[in-house]
């Protein structure tokens, strides 16, 4: 018995999981976006690892995850043979559009301003409501991740291309 059925019990191809396809394509696009930015990180000549290694690996992993999610959406039938509901599809679209919007904000204004906007919105997308549920944890996530990765570990912080607000932090 195969784990990847080619037909449904009625002899028809299983319906595609639209939400997974949208989320997979979003992951691929976000991974490609960050892959492009990873190559902007300065690399010393002859250095095999360096500061761009982890962003390259993470970006490639996101692309592979997106390809896998999209591929399995076409191969696997949804549980119970039913198409996912509209709410799930809308949530997947919202996450994909939000992820691409986050990438655009990072490009335009840099990591910290983009994350200060995107993290609370991410908490709201996943169901947290109000100041205690979405805004404060989102702001704390943005500030703590900035301090941990860019200040403490010294990882390259992408500058904004439209307005470089990182100049205010130095």
Image (cartoon, rainbow, N blue to C red):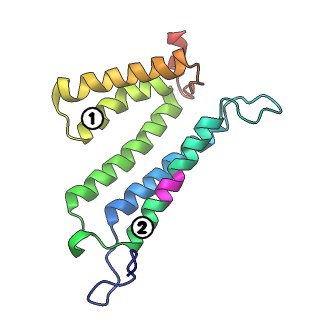
Horizontal and vertical percent for residue 132?
Answer: 18, 23
Magenta-drawn stretch contains 17: no
**Is 74 placed left or right of 149 in the picture?**
left
> Considering only vertical position in the picture, is 49 above or below 60?
above
Which residue occupies the foreground of this view, 163 or 115? 115
Percent position of residue 47, x then y? 78, 32
Q: Secondary structure at mark 2?
A: helix
Q: Residue at x 35, y 28 (%)?
A: 117
Q: Position of residue 44 (x, y in %)?
A: 78, 28
Which sits earlier in the primary sequence, circle 2 or circle 1?
Answer: 2
| Pointer 1 local density, CA inside 10 Å: few below 14, some 14–19, many at least 20 | some
Residue for point 31% across, 37% down: 122
Most foreground residue, 24 or 99: 24
The part of the image, by quadrant, that contains residue 138 is top left
Q: CA distance from mark 2 to mark 1?
A: 27 Å
Furthest residue in direction right, as rendered: 46
Q: Residue at point 31% right, 73% down?
A: 77
Residue 37 position (above or below residue 5)? above
Q: Residues within 10 Å of mark 2 (few under 14, many from 20)?
A: some
Q: Quarter of the image containing the C terminus?
A: top right
Residue 128 seen in the figure: yes
**Residue bounds of the magenta highlight:** 63-67
Left or right, 19 with respect to 146, comes to left
Q: Which of the two discs, 2 and 1, sits closer to the camera?
A: 2
Q: Which residue is mark 2?
A: 72
| Residue under numbered circle 1 | 123
Is disc 1 placed on a helix, strand or loop?
helix
Q: Which numbered tag is attached to residue 150? A: none
> Which residue corresponds to the image point at 43% horizontal and 60% vertical from the top-left?
69
Query: Who is closer to the viewer here, 118 or 155?
Result: 155
88 relative position to 57: left or right: left
Q: Report the magenta stretch's main SS.
A: helix
């Amino acid at each position: 018995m195969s784990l990847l059925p080619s037909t449904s019990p009625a002899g028809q191809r299983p319906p595609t999981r639209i939400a997974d396809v949208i989320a997979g394509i979003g992951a691929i696009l976000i991974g490609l976006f960050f892959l492009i930015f990873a190559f902007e990180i300065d690399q010393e000549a002859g250095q095999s690892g360096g500061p761009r290694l982890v962003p390259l690996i993470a970006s490639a992993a996101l692309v592979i995850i997106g390809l896998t999610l999209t591929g399995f959406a076409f191969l696997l039938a949804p549980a119970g043979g039913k198409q996912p509901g509209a709410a799930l599809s809308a949530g997947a679209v919202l996450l994909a559009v939000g992820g691409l919007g986050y990438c655009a904000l990072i490009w335009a204004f840099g990591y910290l301003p983009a994350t200060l906007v995107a993290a609370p919105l991410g908490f709201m997308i996943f169901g947290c409501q109000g100041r205690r549920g979405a805004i404060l944890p989102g702001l704390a996530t943005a500030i703590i991740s900035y301090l941990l990765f860019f200040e403490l570990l010294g990882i390259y912080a992408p500058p904004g291309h439209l307005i470089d607000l990182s100049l205010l932090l130095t």
